[in-house]
Amino acid sequence: MRPLRWLVLAAGLSAACASNTIVPAPVVTAPRFPDFVPPAVPPALASGPSLERQDRGWRFLQSGDLRNAEHEFQVALRAVPAFHPAETGLGYVELARRDAKAALVHFDRALEAAPADPAPLVGRAQALVALSREADALAAYEAAFAADRSLADVPRRIEVLRFRILEQGLSRARQAARAGRLDEAVAAYTTAIANSPDSAVLYRELAAVERQKGDAAQALQHFRRASTLDPSDAGSLAQIGELLEAQGDLAGAERAYVDALAIEPSDGVSAKVEALRTRAELARLPEEYRAIERLPQVTRGDLAALIGVRLGPLLTRRSAAVVVTDVRTHWASSWIMAVARAGVMEPYTNHTFQPRGLVRRSDLAQAASRLLARIAAADPARAKSWESVRVKFTDLSAGHLAYPAASAAVASGVMAAGPENTFQPSRPVTGADAVAAIARIEALAGPLASAKGK
């Protein structure tokens, strides 16, 4: 019995000695976790056994021996509970085990003691990424880099996170916009912009949603921000033009459209500029002119104004010796004199123009035929479609004084024949008819009338 007791006692002593044996820390030449940032030990804690335990724990960690690493960090903490670098070490041990939640607890404890320590900040960011909390992770990485600019890899991680957050926010915002949840889409775009404030795409798409909501002021502000961030953004400039035009700021709208065209040619935007300039020109004209299209009957003064404004380049002078005595105070006097000097609408023999006299269809046809003759003289090919045609009217014979002009006007499409192929030469002309006829002449003239109104 005695020998047996001694054998048991010897075995127990041997086990006790083995349990107190310190495992040699490995020499690490190729770290298993190169993206883990070793915590710095502050001077106040840089003495005593915890410092050695911290060093050993980090070497075990980087060799991949997580059990011994955890043991060393725990021993360091038991010896000095305020030794926060060991909490950081334990956080990285849990990260190595892929337990992000447990890691986050340790990093947060370390940061309570040292809020600006870059090592637990980087570890916390990595844990938050693993937990799909990208926005919080971004904040942690940014704080880490602000604390230590030597962290060369952190800026790249920040950019990756920003891009990921941008994509996620953009996806949520677009889904909400497509589903018609406009308030939700605005909120999603606003959050995405907070994380990526220099993204022109976000501002442009947010503005489009705001415009869809009817919030023109916010849409205009954000389209402008988009075009500032991206000077090549012709689309935002075109949208700015549309919003300004809707607000009545025609000059501002034209500038925006022209700036858009300077970046990227567009037939649609060019048409908007042309329409805007026509609208602006019209706005500068007398109210009497703007009312012509609504008149039940037009006067000679009205017709002269239409021709002068829309077909000015065709009014080359025929004679400077025209005398007109009754138009000096008329609102359309300058255009009346222009058409009279050009011979398109002649004064009467008593030198009066009678600007308030009503225009009949035969009068309109006469003026139209003279304008068509000017187009034919400048471009004979254009005139073939009407010069060789003789239209038959049931109420106007070929020998009638008004027939040549009526035939040319109808053959060219400037005027239309009436029911049963009548011309109705004495019927008064409405404002809409006069405007339509002058517009058709303008189309036939093409480039010859491209400087209208100047």
Image (spheres, grey):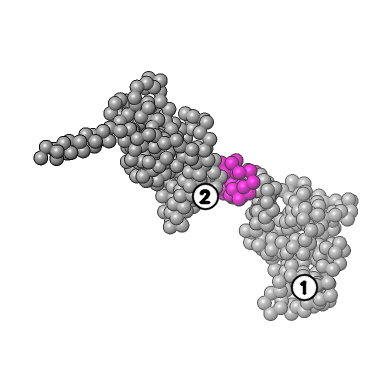
Residue 121 spot, x, y in % from top left: 42, 34
- Residue under numbered circle 1: 411
Evaluate whether residue 220 shows in this view. Answer: no
**CB atoms at circles 2 and 1 under 8 Å apart?**
no
Residue 141 spot, x, y in % from top left: 46, 36
Q: Is residue 86 above or below residue 401?
A: above
- The residue nearer to you, when weighing 400 against 184, is 184
Magenta extent: 225-254
Residue 397 image label: none
Q: Is most of the magenta stretch helix, strand or loop? A: helix
Q: Is residue 52 left or right of residue 224?
A: left
Q: Is residue 33 above or below residue 269?
A: above
Q: Is residue 335 above or below residue 17?
A: below
Give neighbour class at mark 2: few <14, some 14-19, many 20+ (Cα, 10 Å). many
Q: Compare marks 2 and 1 and give the one earlier in the sequence.
A: 2
- Give the residue at x 14% y 40%: 4
- Residue under numbered circle 2: 205
Evaluate whether residue 296 shows in this view. Answer: yes
Residue 33 spot, x, y in % from top left: 44, 41
Name the residue type under label 2: Glu
Residue positioned most to the left: 1
Give neighbour class at mark 1: few <14, some 14-19, many 20+ (Cα, 10 Å). some
- The residue nearer to you, when weighing 444 against 140, is 140
Query: Nearer the observer, disc 2 or disc 1?
Result: 2
Q: Is residue 105 left or right of residue 13?
A: right
